[in-house]
Amino acid sequence: WQARPGRTAPPPAPSSRLRGGVWGAVSGLTSTIAHAGGPPLAVYLYPLRLDRATLAATTVVFFGVLNYVKLVPYFFLGQLSATNLLTSLLLLPLAPVGVYLGIWLAKRMSDAWFYRVIYAMLAVTGTKLVWDGLGL
């Protein structure tokens, strides 16, 4: 993270179990309902200004655990159909491609650009979610 010339960057936000728990719960709920848990988690994590590896690892672990937990309600809701499982199986080979592409990009990007890109992607995602929510 770098401030613009002539400006100083604000200090990283302090971590908070309460805020982390609230935003984690909101992220879990929105992820379960609409697969949109990234923005609420970002609201808590991005201001902490963690180093890239810690931010990526925290996000991966959070959503990895969350996705396994979601299997139980999805099973009881009948969402684990043969069609959904086949689609997942067909897309599975693309997962390592995405991982390696992310690693490749992260190694070539400064911290300042890394945070600019993730904030821009968060803005695009948030705008899309609001657009869809309003039925536009």
Image (tube, rainbow, N blue to C red):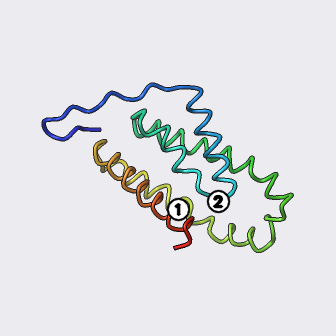
> How busy is the neighbourhood of tag 2: few (under 14 within 10 Å), some, or many (20 plus)?
few
Residue 56: percent from left, percent from top:
48, 43
Q: Secondary structure at mark 2?
A: helix
Amino acid on which disc 1 is placed: Leu
Name the residue carrying label 1: 129
Q: Residue furthest left?
A: 6
Q: Secondary structure at mark 1?
A: helix
Q: Residue at x 30, y 30 (%)?
A: 10
Q: Residue at x 61, y 39 (%)?
A: 24
Q: Residue at x 51, y 50 (%)?
A: 39
Q: Is residue 71 above or below residue 58?
A: below
Q: In the picture, which quadrant includes the N terminus? A: top left
Amino acid on which disc 2 is placed: Ala
**Left of 11 or right of it: where is 5?**
left
How many labels sit on residues? 2
The span from disc 1 to disc 2 (Cα, nearest Å) is 10 Å
Residue 12: percent from left, percent from top:
37, 29
Q: Is residue 79 above or below residue 105?
A: below
Residue 71: tell me if it is visible.
yes
**Left of 78 or right of it: where is 62?**
left
Q: Nearer the viewer, residue 83 or 49?
A: 49
Q: Are marks 1 and 2 in contact (CB under 8 Å)?
A: yes
Return the disc, 1 or 2, that comes first in the chain's sequence.
Answer: 2
Task: Point out which mark residue 34 bears.
Answer: 2
> How busy is the neighbourhood of tag 1: few (under 14 within 10 Å), some, or many (20 plus)?
some
Residue 31: percent from left, percent from top:
64, 53
